[in-house]
Image (cartoon, grey):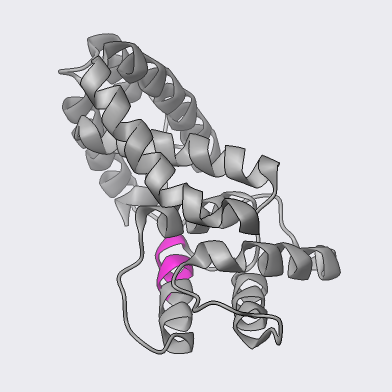
């Protein structure tokens, strides 16, 4: 599996090459790429799925989002299960870079919750996989806190934005896929509203 940065850029580059006009990827597109990455779907499988979506003789609409490629990527996954991996490979990172990054995100989180910030500082980064799991658990705790902290206006704004992103593609995905994307898009937009960084070593790149 390619590293985090290459995985995203290669998908974006290939998707744009298949389109007739250039458009920036939407937050939903980024959530989809993150989801494929987290599931351990190899880059070649995603690209093959995108290519198949564009090549389909049944295609009636212009493909302007990766959401139109979800079913094709899923189909290719079923056909190429032997290429699946358990998890994305963490990039090769310098120990000093990791330590500095952990201090940085702990400092950014401190205004929201000092306890979580202190837990971040105590993360042992000698084992990258364990460190990533610890940061992921702390992010879940942080998001739960932000949901409680968010006022009604923010909650309504996030819901409207999430619905606006997903509604056009509900018919192209299964109920389980829609639910998963709603949850992940909620997370991304809530963190953006509070200007809180993601707690993951992948974002160090």
Q: Residue at x 40, y 41 (%)?
A: 162
Can you give x and y, in whole percent of width and height, for residue 3 in the image?
48, 64
In the rendered view of the protein, which quadrant contains the C terminus? bottom left
Q: Residue 73 appears in which quarter of the rendering? A: bottom right
- The number of numbered badges drawn on the structure is 0
At horizontal 67% and vertical 81% (from top left) the residue drawn is: 52
**Residue depicted at x 15% and y 18%:** 111
Q: Where 88 sits versus 12, above or below?
A: above
The kind of secondary structure the magenta stretch mainly shows is helix
Range of magenta residues: 4-9
| Residue 161 locus on image (x, y percent) | 33, 42
Q: Position of residue 184 (x, y in %)?
A: 48, 39
Which quadrant of the figure contains the N terminus?
bottom right
5 is within the stretch colored magenta:
yes
Q: 79 above or below 103?
A: below
Residue 27 visible: yes
Q: Is residue 186 magenta?
A: no
Q: Is residue 101 left or right of residue 91?
A: left
Classify residue 47 as left or right of residue 7: right
Q: Residue 138, located in which quarter of the rendered image?
A: top left
Residue 127 on image: x %, y %: 51, 38
Residue 127 in view in this figure? no
**Residue at left offset 59%, top offset 83%:** 54
| 30 and 196: which is toward the camera | 30
* Residue 139 position (above or below residue 164): above
Return the residue nearer the eye: 99 or 106.
106
């Amino acid at each position: 599996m390619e590293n985090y940065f290459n995985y995203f850029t290669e998908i974006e580059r290939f998707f744009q090459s298949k389109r007739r006009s250039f458009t920036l990827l939407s937050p939903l597109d980024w959530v989809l790429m993150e989801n494929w990455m987290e599931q351990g779907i190899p880059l070649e499988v995603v690209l093959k799925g995108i290519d198949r979506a564009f090549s389909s003789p049944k295609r009636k609409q212009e493909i302007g989002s990766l959401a139109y490629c979800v079913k094709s990527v899923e189909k290719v996954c079923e056909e190429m299960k032997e290429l699946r991996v358990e998890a994305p490979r963490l990039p090769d990172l310098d120990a000093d870079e990791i330590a500095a990054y952990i201090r940085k995100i702990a400092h950014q989180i401190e205004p929201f919750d000092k306890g979580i910030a202190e837990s971040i500082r105590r993360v042992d980064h000698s084992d990258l996989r364990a460190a990533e799991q610890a940061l992921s658990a702390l992010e879940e705790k942080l998001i739960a806190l932000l949901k409680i902290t968010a006022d009604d206006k923010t909650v309504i704004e996030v819901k409207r934005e999430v619905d606006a992103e997903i509604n056009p593609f509900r018919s192209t995905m299964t109920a389980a896929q829609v639910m998963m994307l709603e949850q992940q898009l909620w997370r991304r937009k809530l963190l953006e509203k509070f200007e809180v960084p993601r707690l993951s070593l992948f974002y160090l790149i």
